[in-house]
Every structure is written in structure tokens, then in C-alpha cells.
Amino acid sequence: MAREEALGDGLSDQEHRDHQARGEAFVNHSFRPAGHLLRKRRFAQSFVIGVALAVVAVSPSQAAAKIQHLTSPGGIEAWFVQDATVPLIAMEYSFAGGSAQDPKDKSGVANLVGDLLDEGSGDLDSKTFHERLDRRAIELSFSATRDTFRGSLRMLRDNKDEAFDLLRSALTSPHFETADVERIRAQVISTLRGESTDPSSLAHRKFLEVAFGDHPYSRPDTGTLDTVPKVEIAELKDYARRILAKDTLRIAVVGDVDPDTLGKLLDKTFGSLPVKAELTPIPDVVAAKPPQCAFIPLDVPQTVVTFGGPGINRHDADFMAADVVNHILGGGMSSRLFKEVRGKRGLVYSIPEALLWMDHSALFIGDTGTRADRAGETVDAVETEIRRIADEGPTQKELDEAKSYLKGSQMLALDTSSKLAQALLQYQLDKLPIDYIEKRNGIVDAVTLDDTRRVAKKVWGDGLLTVIVGRAPQAAAQPAAATPKPN
């Protein structure tokens, strides 16, 4: 399942967050190199080695017993797990807004802000700011999803004062110097140029256009080659001013710090932010009704297929039943899609499919690649499995196995401070109770076979929105033309 990035993914409980990350990767076309600036992480090698040797192990039952609803002296709220297993602190936080708040003709503003907040602030230029991070082995990053502007901070316990102070500076007094803006803009444009001929990126962007039309969710969060060059520094500053405010702030902290100290750090870091954000209202939207199919011609050896349709909202009473069905349909190597499309027919290498929910809409979405001359057969096989799950629903055996997996996987999913902090933040964004970890397996157990059959028809019964990127069918049957040599 998934909850915006993508990647996302998402992310409610960890199984949900794994799906979320996958779904966000689809809609944000973020199959990028690990070092891409959007996902940049600033930390020293010694920090990585130290943490790798001493991860914070927290079982769901232990975590649930320790989760505190902390309110700082200044009124900043956070979900908090105090754990001194290792001297590490992880914090995840978010503000409402995200890329949906970009101006209509300036998509990519939120993404640029995320890439620039740590490029110098206060009395520190970009070089000095990053030297401070590296010297203290502090990991600091920002990113924009469609509905949120997020941040992540990790540090060793002894470096917490400097880490939180650098974050405060980045949030409250970012520079947005012309040289830094143009350097980051050039990197984003370079990535966008690469994506303009990448079949996966083209498929994901087209899928959003088909699904959401003129809604803000249809716009790529990283912007386009037309919009990014036009973004002005004043618009970056205005976005930060409007979005970074205390009324939509959600925080999760896990690690070796006591409540009193954490409360003071939160006040110092976030206390001077504006009280109220200035958000443009975003309307709810239902994705386009299937079936629909779009084709983008591109002379590449492998054809990419992105498929999906309207999904299910997080607070729908049938949500957990849909999550169970989704696992049966597209949740890994035991799923129907994997077995039928890869295992029996050998058409693809992988075929993940996920639920994705956002504040104003929801999707199910999948992605795969195949030989150009077998694209039609692949699409037919996917459609057959989607129809079969909608018409017949799962079997009792599939339901029992899915429940067992979904319950057992959670025990392995919240095994580090960072994962637990990410989960606790997502619970808040999804408006789930603070004891959701304890309740979740009972909710899974309560799903019946009748529930899954009803929800399978409800979510998957209308067919597919499909985007195909590759050679035209007639071209796929012919050898590719030789590339002309330059004169």
C-alpha cells in the first residue's frame, strides 16, 4: 500500500509504508540514482558505520507501550519514544502543503525549496553549513510530497544541540542565494532532461495526467523543463513563508533524549515559525474512470506499462480489507500478478502494484516492463488478473496467508529508530490513534472473506487506466533502424 511522496511507501504501519514508497515512486517517477539531490543525505562515514553496528531494535509491542504524546512548554506537540539502547536520536516531521501548493504554472517550487533549505542559512553559507553537518555526523534532509513538506533529522545524542540548531536555522532563515539557486536549478533541469527520454518517467507523468486532468495532483512534483527555469527566488521564499508554520506541524521523535530536554529543543527549533500557514484550498478529486489507455511512442528496447485506477481512502471502512486484497494481487513474489505474469508466462521481471492514498484522492497503481513485441500480451495478462480478483475475490487460503504475512511482517518492520519515527509521523498524518500499533493486527484479523470479495469488486471492478511507452506494435516486430552516422 502507499501514502504519498511514493516511496512511499509511503507510509501508515510499515507494511503500508513499504507500499507507500512504491506507490510514490510510481506517481513521482522517482526511480532515480541513489545520490539524486532530491534524496540527498548529509552524513559522515563514521556515522553510517556507527549506526550500522548499533541499530535501535524496537518491537511493535514495546514501541506502543512507550509512545508518549509530548507537549513542549511552548505548545509544540510530538509523538515520542524514549530509548537509550544506543546514543542516537531520529526525528521525522512534516508541514501540510507539499507540491500541490505550487503555482499552477510553476510546478517544482516545493521541490526546489526542499533542495535549497540546507544550502546556507543564518550566518552560514552553503559550504560552511555542510561542513558543520559533516563534522558532527548530522543527517539532515528535506523533501516535498504532494500533500506535505517533510524533513528528517538524525544525530548522535551528544550532537543534538548543534543538530537542532542547524535545523532551526534552515527553517527560519534560509538564504536562497542566487548562486546556490542556480546551481540546484541546473541539477534539477539536468535530471528532468534525462527523464524526458526515460520511458518510466514518461509513463508515470502521463498516468497522472490521465488520472487527474487539471487537478494539482496531475502536475509532476519535480516540475518540468518549461516550469523550473521560470521559478523565481521570490517564489521560493514565499513558499517557505506560507508553508513552514506551526499549525500544520507534525513531529515524531525516537531515541536517547529525555522528555524535558526534547521539549526545550522543539521550542527552540520550531517555536519562532509563523503560527498559521497560508494554504491554497485543494479540492477532492476522484481519479478518471477506467477503462482508458494512452500510448507514447518511444524507440526503446523495452516497453514500459503503468496501470491503475481509482483507489480507496485511508478512512474508508473497507480500507484494511482492500490492503489485504492488494497484497494478494500485487504484494510481492507470492502475489497473483507475479505468479501469473512472470511465473507462468515469463513476460516481465517484476510487476509491483500498490495502494496510494493522498489527502484528496486515492489510487491503485502498478508498473512493469516487457519486450516490445510482447507488450500487448502483458497488458492482456494484467487485465485478466485484475478482472479475476474483482469477479471472484481471493480464496480462503489466500486470505489466511495474506493475514499471516501482514501481521508477521510488522514485527520486523519497526526495528530501527528511523523506521519507527517514520511510522509514527505517518500515523499522525493519517489521523490514526496513538495506540494504532497495538490495534493494527486485530484490524487485520477482523477482515472476512466476504469483506475481501466486496472490496475487490469495489476497487478493481472497473478495469484499468493504462499507459504504454515504447515502440509502436508494427515497429516492435521489425529490427530497429540503424542510427545514421554523423557527417
Image (cartoon, rainbow, N blue to C red):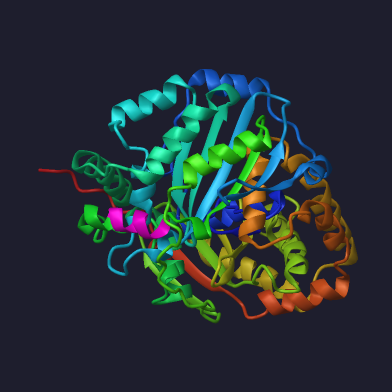
The foreground one among 64 and 7 is: 64
Up-down relation of residue 29 to residue 187 (above or below): below
At 32% across and 26% down in the image, what residue appears? 128
Quarter of the picture holding the C terminus: top left
Task: Give the percent coordinates (x, y) of residue 274.
Answer: 42, 56
Task: Give the percent coordinates (x, y) of residue 366.
Answer: 58, 61
* The quarter of the displayed image where residue 310 is located: bottom right
Up-down relation of residue 474 to residue 346 (above or below): below
Q: How many marks?
A: 0
The foreground one among 121 and 260 is: 260
Up-down relation of residue 362 to residue 260 (above or below): below
At 43% across and 23% down in the image, what residue appears? 134
At 57% across and 22% down in the image, what residue appears? 158
Residue 447: tell me if it is visible.
Answer: yes
The foreground one among 268 and 226 is: 268
* The quarter of the displayed image where residue 214 is located: bottom left
Q: In this image, 118 relative to 355: left or right?
A: left
The foreground one among 341 and 156 is: 156
Task: Give the percent coordinates (x, y) of residue 271.
Answer: 48, 47
Quarter of the picture holding the N terminus: bottom right
Q: Main secondary structure of the magenta part?
A: helix
Is residue 447 on the magenta stretch?
A: no
Task: Give the percent coordinates (x, y) of residue 139.
Answer: 49, 32
Residues in magenta, as a range:
236-243
* The quarter of the displayed image where residue 29 is located: bottom left
Residue 347: tell me if it is visible.
Answer: no
Which residue is at the far left?
A: 487
